Image (cartoon, rainbow, N blue to C red):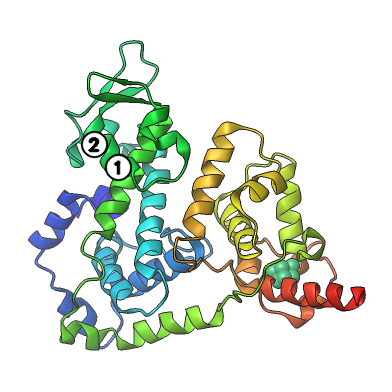
Amino acid sequence: MDPLHARYPFLAAARESVREADIGLVAVVAGDERHPAVERGVERVRRALVDGTVRSDPDDERRWATRAELLSYPVARVLVSLVDAPGAVEKYASAEADTAYERFTDDFENPDDGLKSTADTAVSLRALLAEFDLSGAVRETVSGDGYRIAVGRYLALSSNLDGERWTLATRQLADGTVKVSETELRELLREAVRQRVAAGLPTDVPDEIRAGLTDEVAELQETFSEIDVSQDIDVLAPDCFPPCVASLVERAQDGENLDDHAEFALVAFLTSANADTDELLALCGVDSDTRATALRYRANRVGDESGAQYAPPSCETMAAYDECPVADEEDPTTDGRCETVSHPLSYYEDALDAAESAGD
Ligand code: SF4
């Protein structure tokens, strides 16, 4: 199996290689021992719905074989169709698209860093455009300062993207094409991935596959019930933030480029704490257009249209990511309230209650 397909399992060629290998999902889910593809499929969905990425857990020492990684994608599609969590399909498709975006951006910028393994698994812009039938619809501008994309394809890919900058009125339109920057073309490709992943979900799951995944679905449901986020928080009060969030805010304000899980934790917390996108950008001291664009996208994806939003990570997950100052082994922060909670949002709710009582 091709490692490229394991990195980009939504590619038509990846689906074909699974079909050619003639590995039925029934066989994968039915064994007495849990198949690695099922294990990874569970992780894929859990990470998508909890952390906004489908990358494997950075603290997990296991390395997934190409076969397990590739097969985990159809398993994850089945699982996300079976779990009962608000906005599960949308969050899952967005997390697959976000992860693909990170990977293909890296591939475009470092197509061959001298490692044969990298060259074998990298995708090119040309290949990705062909994958989404965009080769004839996208061309580089003569001056090389961006691309022009056929207006029909532009509209199909941008209609779901937030922000005035995507409206046609703000675009240079000429000869039936719309000008986009290189970054914007990548964002449109991310949307193409999201649309493809979301297509056909939730899927009808045959009874024998459903029966084989009963434990896995229950495991996922349990994870989500543990992170049931209060929908009652309607006050944004930075003074009441827990130490982990205060530290992330401070680092963002200092201009640090937070890595993915830290940025996700911060944005998910602030969105849950009722910050709108402008408040979020102000709190994080964002002053560059590129950062603002990335954070806006993240914020819009974290809080979805239905109000069903990503829960920020629990204290346990924050500690696993080395983002909990209280759990810092070398220089731990002491905070009495942290000892009584298992989730940063619980901390925030308690602190808000205490502040309100003190003000009575
Ligand atoms: S214990 Fe929880 S709330 Fe407190 S700093 Fe750590 S992650 Fe944040």
Closer to the camera, 330 or 315? 315
Q: Residue at x 70, y 54 (%)?
A: 248
> What label sits on residue 157 in the rendered view?
1
What kind of residue is marked 2? Arg
- How far from the left and from the top, in percent, is residue 183? 42, 32
Closer to the camera, 27 or 172? 172
Which quadrant of the frame does ligand 1 lie within?
bottom right
Between the C-alphas of marks 1 and 2, the distance is: 6 Å
What kind of residue is marked 1? Leu
Task: Give yes or no for contact between labels 1 and 2 (Cβ–Cβ under 8 Å).
Answer: yes
Q: In this figure, what is the number of numbered marks?
A: 2
The crowd level at tag 2 (other Cα within 10 Å; few <14, some 14-19, many 20+) is: some
**Is residue 92 in sight in this rendering?**
yes
Where, by quadrant of the figure, is residue 79 drawn? bottom left
* Quadrant of the rendering where the N terminus is positioned: bottom left
Q: Residue at x 68, y 42 (%)?
A: 256
* Quadrant of the rendering where the C terminus is positioned: bottom right
Q: State left or right for residue 97 relative to residue 225.
A: left
Where, by quadrant of the figure, is residue 89 drawn? bottom left
State whether residue 130 is above or below residue 6.
Answer: above
Residue at mark 2: C-beta within 8 A of ligand 1: no
Q: State left or right for residue 328 relative to residue 343.
A: right
State whether residue 86 is above or below residue 200.
Answer: below
Q: Residue furthest front?
A: 169
Closer to the camera, 202 or 220? 202
Q: State left or right for residue 219 relative to residue 80.
A: right
- How far from the left and from the top, in percent, is residue 210? 23, 84
Which residue is denoted by mark 2 in the rendering? 153
